[in-house]
Image (cartoon, rainbow, N blue to C red):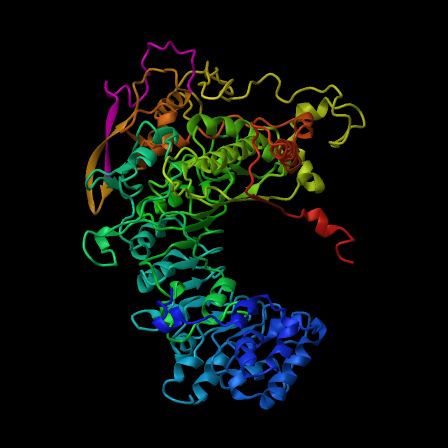
């Protein structure tokens, strides 16, 4: 934020032209500039601030972009007064001349690359340059031209250096000398995403030197960034950056400890001040493991355990210092109150902040270093990990080991279990699961103290993972993930994210949503919308009962929900059927002429696939909160060690202790496990249960899974809220590999044709629900579940759309 105004500015009368200027049309600015000097002083900066979009607004056709630009740079600019050219602070080429195929290919002296050599001299106050997507643009030309342009005076040298440079997808090879040049020294925002070559030139330039000292926002998407290179970058920038976009790279869980230690340097924001509303963290001294990180558990109050405290929607009270100073010291660091405006890291927002636009005057050169976007809060607050190889456990650890400073986080498809993980024999070895379950607690304020915007896989809310496996159609994979795998996910991790888990969260995007559902997915999304409506109504009524003249300041709650759906598989024949979707017996029993079509009468009698084999699933709950009773699994009568992937078998008498290891080696409920933490090894007691099958199916499955020695390894961690809801006592340490092994069924139960036909359109179901509840809301009925926030639905086009002849016309 800029400094306070002077006394004269504070008491001076505001010019009425400044008041009306933001409401003036661009088409009128030129005429207003001709009225007199006073009008020119107010309206000329708005007209010349960003000339390329402005000329479009004034009527320039896209096909004439190139001719107009070349004519202006090489001819008309020489007729313009230098003071007017100095008003240009931004050149935004992103949507300019994109229709001209010769935009960068003209080899004459009157070409776009040639104009770059003139820009530093023509526009001395240029702060922002955006040339996204212009494949043959060469930003190095700008640095060379800047070095060859003498500054008008010593104080004006700084004005020639840009503060924002956005050059993704330009296909320019950037040498080390570009990043060490004086031209990029003042950069606050740098986007070098999806450029050819490696990032070694950037690493070499900034490693051990003072280049890019003011950089706060770095976007390096799609650069094949691996763990080793990332660690070097993190070591160099440390706490300087507050926003980084690492999407579509090659990062894995191995980089998480270094990343958390070097780029999140804020003082810890997690305290126990709101214990009754949110709970608090308990962390034993020097206790953890190299795999899991520090062991932290949540101590719940009787309200926080079910998010029901009457003041859970109240904003934090202001922080006061005991001493007469305005700035809090490090040990007094406090989290944001949850009501302030969110800091944005998009190029459009940063451009307005540092260079202004038609509606906002650019800040003075003296005020720029004091802008909020130009200062770092000692580490990253905005992070995008979309498209990397980090697992759900790695993301969980990153959030747990940071001090709670993240405000905006995006990761669309974390790996839950990847290809190469041992699977039951019925599954293809290339099978993988994506999503995040069992980690809803890390998005609560007790861990994510400042989180306001989240973009995450839909399983955080639905508890339904995404399944990838060869040999099955899209519809079949969706059905399996939503039925047999979902049942086991609910058994192992019964807790999913709800709006009141974090009322400070204002925007949530759920990604990778299937367009078709067998029922549970639709029901879970509708339930989430109902809970959002309940939260909204509670917030609206939070201050109604106050006896004070001043109602308490309340949080906004969830105000924006974006649902990103994948393509509808029904629109693409390849998404419907696959020869492997039906087993041989089902194919042999088909009526003559039926073939592989899924568009016959779905009511026609047919045989069920594998009718003699019962699915290896725990039964679904009859009511919310009711514990399912396990059923006998196939093959339970066979001798030998129990199947570690199978839920507990209730046929075993409940009073008989399991006979396999580790129960055959100990009479207690714990075994010792050697773990490494902070460079030293120690023993920790890991809970294995009583060994007697009981009322909790997840605990039974966990105890049976422990028969596999490979699942009793160093991957141990404390029981978190989801484990506790599944039956694990609080304060215990678990073998995580054994617990997660229950997710995959031992039998691959494929859907029949009728099962696939019954899968409905999720968007249509949501629309019907919203229509019904909106009617109740508008009729002012006392009971309704209409959420008045912004609901945004995005649906991806199917491949059939792009194969259509209409698409190419």
Seen from the viewer's position, the closer of residues 566 and 50 is 50
Seen from the viewer's position, the closer of residues 136 and 239 is 239
- Which quarter shows the N terminus? bottom left
Seen from the viewer's position, the closer of residues 242 and 292 is 242
Q: Please state if 102 lies on the left or on the right of 701 as rendered.
A: right
User: Is 505 colored magenta in this rendering?
Assistant: no
Q: Dividing the picture into quarters, in which one does residue 155 lie?
A: bottom left
Is residue 653 visible in the rendered image? The answer is yes
Q: Please state if 569 lies on the left or on the right of 338 as rendered.
A: right
Image position, residue 292 (x, y; %): 31, 41
Q: Name the residue: 49% across, 71% down.
A: 361
Give the extent of the magenta segment.
648-675
Residue 48 to residue 288: above or below = below
Residue 274 to residue 203: above or below = above
Q: Name the residue: 68% across, 80% down.
A: 67
Q: Name the residue: 70% across, 26% down.
A: 587
User: Mostly what secondary structure, the magenta segment?
Assistant: loop
Q: Please state if 637 lies on the left or on the right of 43 as rendered.
A: left
Is residue 738 visible in the rendered image? The answer is no
Image position, residue 712 (x, y; %): 32, 31
Image position, residue 385 (x, y; %): 45, 52
């Amino acid at each position: 934020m800029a400094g306070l105004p002077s006394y004269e500015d504070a008491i001076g009368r505001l010019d009425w032209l400044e008041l009306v200027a933001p409401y003036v049309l661009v088409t009128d600015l030129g005429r207003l500039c001709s009225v007199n000097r006073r009008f020119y002083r107010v309206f000329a900066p708005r007209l010349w601030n960003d000339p390329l979009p402005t000329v479009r607004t004034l009527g320039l056709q896209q096909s004439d972009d190139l001719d107009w630009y070349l004519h202006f740079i090489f001819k008309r600019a020489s007729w313009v007064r230098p003071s007017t050219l100095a008003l240009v602070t931004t050149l935004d080429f992103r949507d300019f001349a994109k229709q001209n195929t010769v935009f960068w290919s003209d080899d004459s002296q009157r070409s776009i690359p040639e104009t770059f050599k003139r820009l530093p001299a023509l526009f001395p106050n240029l702060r922002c340059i955006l040339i996204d997507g212009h494949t043959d643009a060469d930003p190095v030309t700008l640095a060379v031209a800047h070095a060859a342009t003498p500054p008008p005076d010593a104080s004006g040298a700084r004005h020639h250096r840009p503060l924002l440079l956005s050059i993704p997808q330009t296909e320019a090879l950037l040498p080390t000398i570009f990043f060490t040049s004086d031209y990029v020294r003042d950069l606050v925002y740098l986007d070098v995403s999806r450029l050819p070559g490696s990032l070694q030139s950037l690493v070499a330039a900034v490693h051990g030197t003072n280049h890019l000292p003011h950089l706060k926002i770095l976007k390096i998407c799609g650069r094949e960034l691996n763990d080793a290179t990332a660690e070097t970058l993190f070591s160099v920038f440390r706490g300087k950056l507050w926003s980084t976009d690492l999407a579509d790279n090659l990062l894995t869980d191995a980089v998480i400890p270094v990343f958390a230690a070097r780029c999140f340097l804020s003082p810890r924001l997690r305290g126990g001040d709101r214990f009754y509303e949110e709970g608090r963290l308990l962390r034993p001294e020097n206790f953890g493991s190299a795999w899991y990180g520090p062991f932290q558990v949540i101590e719940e109050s009787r309200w926080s355990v079910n998010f029901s405290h009457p003041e859970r929607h109240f904003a934090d009270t202001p922080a006061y210092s005991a001493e007469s100073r305005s700035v809090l010291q490090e040990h007094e660091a406090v989290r944001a109150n949850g009501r302030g405006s969110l800091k944005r890291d998009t190029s459009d927002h940063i451009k307005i902040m540092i260079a202004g636009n038609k509606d906002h005057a650019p800040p003075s050169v003296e005020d720029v270093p004091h802008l909020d976007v130009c200062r770092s809060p000692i580490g990253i607050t905005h992070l995008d990990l979309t498209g990397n190889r980090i697992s759900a456990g790695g993301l969980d650890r990153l959030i747990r080991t940071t001090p709670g400073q993240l405000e905006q986080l995006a990761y669309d498809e974390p790996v839950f279990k990847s290809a190469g993980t041992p699977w039951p024999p019925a599954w293809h070895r290339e099978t993988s699961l994506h999503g995040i379950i069992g980690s809803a607690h890390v998005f609560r304020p007790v861990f994510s103290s400042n989180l306001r915007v989240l973009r995450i896989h839909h399983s955080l809310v639905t508890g339904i993972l995404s399944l990838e496996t060869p040999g099955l159609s899209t519809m079949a994979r969706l059905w399996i993930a939503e039925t047999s795998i979902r049942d086991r996910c609910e058994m192992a991790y019964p807790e999913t994210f709800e709006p009141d888990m974090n009322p400070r969260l204002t925007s949530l995007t759920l990604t990778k949503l299937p367009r078709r559902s067998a029922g549970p997915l639709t029901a879970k999304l509708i339930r989430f919308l109902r809970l959002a409506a309940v939260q909204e109504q509670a917030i609206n009524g939070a201050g109604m009962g106050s006896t004070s003249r001043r109602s308490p300041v309340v949080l906004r709650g969830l105000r924006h929900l974006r649902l990103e759906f994948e393509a509808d598989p029904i629109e693409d024949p390849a998404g419907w059927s696959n020869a492997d979707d039906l087993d041989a017996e089902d194919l042999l029993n088909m009526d003559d002429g039926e073939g592989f079509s899924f568009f016959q009468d779905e009511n026609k009698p047919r045989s069920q696939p594998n009718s003699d084999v019962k699915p290896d699933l725990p039964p679904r709950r009859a009511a919310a909160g009711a514990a399912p009773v396990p059923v006998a699994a196939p093959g339970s009568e066979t001798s030998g060690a129990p199947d570690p992937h199978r839920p507990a078998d209730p046929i075993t008498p409940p009073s008989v202790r399991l006979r396999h290891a580790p129960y055959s080696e100990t009479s207690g409920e714990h075994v010792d496990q050697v773990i490494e933490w902070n460079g030293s090894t120690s023993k920790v007691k890991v809970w294995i249960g009583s060994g007697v099958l009981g009322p909790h199916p997840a605990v039974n499955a966990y105890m049976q899974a422990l028969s596999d020695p490979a699942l009793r390894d160093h991957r141990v961690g404390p029981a978190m809220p989801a484990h506790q809801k599944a039956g694990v006592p609080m304060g215990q340490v678990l073998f995580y590999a054994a617990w997660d092994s229950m997710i995959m069924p031992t039998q691959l139960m494929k859907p029949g044709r009728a099962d696939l036909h019954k899968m409905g359109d999720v968007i249509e179901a949501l629309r019907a629900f919203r229509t019904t509840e909106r009617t109740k809301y508008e009729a002012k009925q006392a009971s309704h579940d209409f959420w008045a926030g912004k609901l945004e639905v995005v649906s991806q086009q199917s491949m059939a759309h792009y194969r259509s002849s209409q698409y190419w016309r």
